[in-house]
Image (cartoon, rainbow, N blue to C red):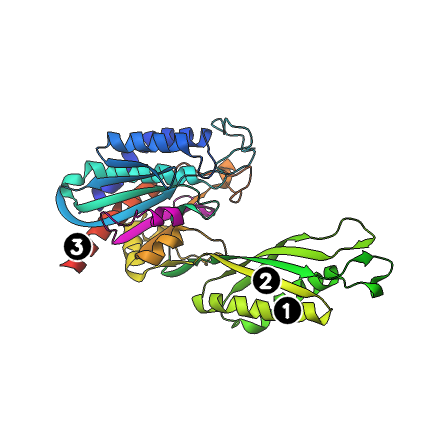
Amino acid sequence: MWSPAIKQLSHQIFEELQHLYRDFHRHPELSFKEKDTSEKIAAYMENLGCTVQKNVAGTGVVALLMGAKKGPTVAIRADIDALPVEEKSGLPYKSIYEGLMHACGHDVHITCALGAAKILASLKNDLQGTVKFIFQPAEEINAGAKAMVEEGVLENPHVSMIFGLHNHPEIPVGKVALKEGPLMASVDTTFVTIKGRGGHGAFPHKDIDPIVAAASIIMSLQTIVSRNVDPQHSAVVSFGTIHGGTANNVIPDEVKLTGTVRTFDPHIRESMEPWMRRVIEHAAASLGCTADFYYRQDLPAVMNHPEAAALGMRAIEEIIGKEGIVIPVPSMGGEDFAIFQEKVPGCFFWLGVGNPDIDAIHPWHSPRFKADEGALSIGAGVLALSACRGLLHCQRADS
């Protein structure tokens, strides 16, 4: 009963969404510094008649939109932070701040969530339950969702299901990608310190070279993916920093490495640390070195719950038609929406924003990143309808 009204309303509010989006795009703010962004969000939600809580996890906002009848609570989450990137998009509404940009499209996410709130506020007499809007800071540093969950955003009232989205420039505008199960990978960080004995580069036989050991470790670790992980599953072991030495002819005492590990399967994730430790310690010892290894689990995989994904899929079909649905290949990128999904059933989808006609083809974090604004109404409509379907589903499950 909701889909025709929500679809119509999502198109009717396009100009308002466009204005909101461009304002957020002009005024990006970094993680845990989203003060002005949060104030704008809070004011907008208060004008819709929502109960608003500010300064959640520092700069987050939580707003409750209560239906006319009592019932369960579902949540819509949007991340709100930007990146330290100098914008080169050429847009007339480009960032006004030097070295700051919404280069990952979180301004799209904010706008879609506000649009969903606007739509649902118009329909609240028909809602049985509450929609909790979670505007989350600091996604870019993998800290915001954890902080908000620790502050209890999934309680008072308890959230039974959560929905969220991320724009995707490789998916054409007018399309939405969703699948049950893993959508984005877990994210872990590795720290390795290899200790040798420094000396003159001309006399390596008198030294214990940690640089050679570091090279051996990096190469040997690649065999974990090719020989320990089932070929039908996926994993990534990459190193992003290598620090060691002060001069071209001096062998240093130690070398430090940092890297990232990605996978979808929780069992493989739990195996990665002991597998890596064995390789690192043995490779170092074979060259006379010792190694200290620290493995930090940062984010679980984004795992779409079967029931939540089915509700999201139905909402997408009713907003843009079955032809607009894309079944995606999971990404090795990470997203801290997964923190919420560890606690309650959730659905996360990719909103197509790509359009080569306007040069909306550049990847996330690019200084030339753009999003086709036509996606705003779609994202708002799908979030709103997903929330309605979620309320009905949770109400039936509770009865």
Callout 1: few (<14), some (14-19), or many (20+) C-alpha neighbours within 10 Å? some
As drawn, the residue found furthest toward the right would be: 202
Q: Secondary structure at mark 3?
A: helix
Query: What residue is pinned by disc 1?
Result: 281
Name the spot of residue 344 as percent of width and height, x first.
Answer: 30, 56
Name the side, left or right, on which 348 lies relative to 103. left
Name the spot of residue 377 as percent of width and height, x first.
Answer: 33, 39
Q: Nearer the viewer, mark 2 or mark 3?
A: 2
Q: Residue 381 falls in which quadrant of the image?
A: top left
Magenta-highlighted residues: 146-174
Of 340 and 277, which appears nearest the observer? 277
Quadrant for the C terminus in the image: bottom left
Q: Within the magenta stretch, is there residue 301?
A: no
Mark identifier at residue 395: 3
Q: Amino acid at mark 3?
A: Gln
Q: Amino acid at mark 1?
A: Glu
Q: Secondary structure at mark 2?
A: strand
Q: Secondary structure at mark 1?
A: helix
Q: Nearer the viewer, mark 3 or mark 1?
A: 1
Q: Amino acid at mark 2?
A: Phe
Q: Residue 118 falls in which quadrant of the image?
A: top left
Name the side, left or right, on which 233 lies relative to 165. right
Of 61 and 184, which appears nearest the observer? 61
Query: What residue is pinned by disc 2?
Result: 293
Q: Estimate the spatial distance between the alpha carbons at disc 3 and disc 1, rounded to whole Å.
A: 54 Å
Name the spot of residue 319 as percent of width and height, x first.
Answer: 29, 46
- Looking at marks 1 and 2 on the same chain, the residue that comes earlier in the sequence is marked by 1
Name the spot of residue 136 as percent of width and height, x first.
Answer: 38, 42
Q: Residue at x 41, y 28 (%)?
A: 23
Proximity of marks 1 and 2: CB atoms separated by less than 8 Å: yes
